[in-house]
Image (spheres, rainbow, N blue to C red):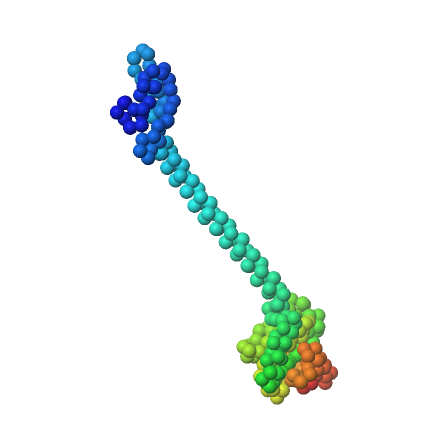
Amino acid sequence: MSNLEGLGHHAHEILHSDSLQLEYQAGSHHFIVNTKYIQELNLFLLVEANTSHFTQDLKKTFLSNLAASLIVTLIVASLIILTINTYQKQLETLATKDPLTNLNNRRTLDAHFHALASHHRRHNLPLSAIIFDIDDLKHINDTHGHLVGDGVLEKVAACAQESVRASDVLARWGGEEFALLLPKTTQEEAFAVAEKLRHAVASDRTIYTLIQHPLTISLGVGTLQTEDTFDTLFYRVDQALLRAKEAGKNQTLIG
């Protein structure tokens, strides 16, 4: 015992005590020793523990727990961010889209108008607008029910999307009315687009299946003038639409 590193310094103390607890250092290791003199055998019992082993185990356990905690934290944070982003997208959709047709709403159309009008005026380009209205939708609702009426609105929206360019801005104006902004489009070209749309709706087989007869729409067309605002342009187009309705429906008039 006297020759053991670290423990040898305590040999005299151990041999002159009935029981003892002590600590010693040997190299990079730290030890705890319990000693007990067994009188019946005239022997000393020494129980020694290397605390470095416990420290390593504790360190491994700590690092494992820390890694697990970090992984769980990252997963929870990712789920929270995903949930927030999902709700954010839903809120953005509610703020910019019509819930039935998934078209732009009137507010979004207004925002597009201001961006387009500024650009077109700066570059001296024509900008036209169309408002179209489903003829006799109230009669369809009364005859076939509002679910069929909503189906007609959805099908008209889909038909309009297929009939216009990707650069055109299509929106639900309200009720049974829809609106279009046509960049780089003259009044004559806008009239041709309106007529194409009118014929596309009238010949749509899906709509015919819903109501058992062709569906007609009335349209008003107008082009941006020098002093026009969003309200004045669409007021003029809306007045053309009203005249088309009063003149017998199923036609396009210029405002």
State the residue at coordinates (46%, 45%): 69
Q: Nearer the viewer, residue 74 or 166?
A: 74
Q: Looking at the rendering, in which quadrant would you find the C terminus?
A: bottom right
Query: Which quarter of the figure has residue 106?
Result: bottom right
Residue 62 percent across, percent down from the top left:
42, 40
Task: Relative to 139, say whether 125 is above or below.
Answer: below
State the residue at coordinates (56%, 56%): 84
Task: Relative to 2, say whether 143 is above or below.
Answer: below
Residue 227 percent across, percent down from the top left:
69, 83
Extreme right residue here?
246
State the residue at coordinates (62%, 83%): 121
Q: Nearer the viewer, residue 184 or 161?
A: 184
Q: Relative to 244, is 29 on the left or the right?
A: left
Q: Relative to 188, is 63 on the left or the right?
A: left
Q: Looking at the rendering, in which quadrant would you find the N terminus?
A: top left
Query: Which quarter of the figure has residue 44?
Result: top left
Extreme bottom residue here?
188
Residue 243 percent across, percent down from the top left:
72, 84
Answer yes or no: is residue 236 visible. yes
